[in-house]
Amino acid sequence: MTSQSHDAPWRRPEDSEAPTPGRPATASLVDPEDDLPSATYAGDFETTTIPHYDSTSARVSSSGYGLVGASQPLPYVQPPDTGRHSVFGPPDTDTAEQDERVRAAGRRGTQDFGLLILRVGLGSVLIAHGLQKLFGWWGGHGLTAFKNSLSDVGYQHADILTYVAAGGEIVAGVLLVLGLFTPLAAGGALAYLINGLIASVSGQSDSRSFPYFLPDGHEYEITLILVAAAVILIGPGRYGFDAGRGWARRPFIGSFAALLLGIGGGIAVWVLLNGANPLS
């Protein structure tokens, strides 16, 4: 466009009386260089094409459609890490590690099979001894002989205690074999075994001695007591009806409670129904 004085009135270029010095009269208002394509021309859709970003030298757009005349894209901002992951994306590291720990806890090898053998072995012994007392099977003496033995040791209410002891022994054994209510079953078995150990010690001629090895010792009874205590503390394992319960996966407080209940129950039955000091 032509340059005019601020004091002169505005007029059209074609109405000029004389050509501007240094410019031909045939010059048009359009710069011929404006018709040339730009260096970043990309066709008829130049205004909608994202210009190439050069990190070394920024190019200034001549089209007038850029942001403040610059062709550089807006800077990318990393979104903050909120500790969560999208449902469409991969899990974060913490979740993956937690899942791996859960899977590793599930791989217990032969541990559950060993607990099954321990539990079934103890339960089978209890069932066999209970059936001996009730029916006289496998060389047992039956209910009458068992009742007389309880009376000889000093138990009161031996007629009722005979059925309670034999029946409780069988029930605890069956529950242990099935893996059902295992802490309570093992706690009842522990109470019965501890009470039997006290009764056998009090029936000795010399109560001040404590023989351990068989045939006159108490190693068999002590072994069964330790097995019952181990089943309470370790748990039944996965091969049983208690597999989905907490005391099968991670036994802790309940196991200690069942252990104390078994020990205290065995001693309480002796004190309440006999009252004699086995160590005297």
Image: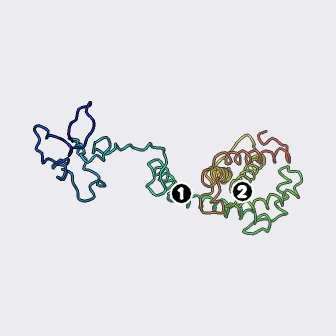
Q: Amino acid at mark 2?
A: Ala
Spatial separation of the CA atoms under disc 1 and disc 2: 21 Å
Q: Are marks 1 and 2 in contact (CB under 8 Å)?
A: no
Q: Secondary structure at mark 2?
A: helix
Residue 133: image quadrant is bottom right
Q: How is the image coloured?
A: rainbow
* Residue occupying the point 85% across, 46% down: 274
Q: Secondary structure at mark 1?
A: helix
Q: Residues within 10 Å of mark 2 (few under 14, many from 20)?
A: many
Q: Which residue sits furthest top?
A: 7
Q: Amino acid at mark 1?
A: Gln
Residue identifier under label 1: 111
Q: Quadrant of the N terminus?
A: top left
Residue 101 lies, in percent from the top left, at: 49, 51
Could you tell whether 30 is left or right of 225 in the image? left
> Vertically, is 194 above or below 110?
above
* Residue occupying the point 28% across, 58% down: 45
> Vertically, is 7 above or below 263?
above
Residue 52 lies, in percent from the top left, at: 24, 50
Residue identifier under label 2: 185
> Vertically, is 143 above or below 265?
below
Mark linked to residue 204: none
* Residue occupying the point 14% across, 47% down: 27
Marked residue nearer the N-terminal end (1 or 2)? 1
Could you tell whether 143 is left or right of 16 in the image? right
Q: Quadrant of the C terminus?
A: top right
Out of 119 and 96, give the one closest to the viewer: 96
Out of 56 and 79, give the one closest to the viewer: 56
Residue 57 lies, in percent from the top left, at: 20, 41
Residue 146: image quadrant is bottom right
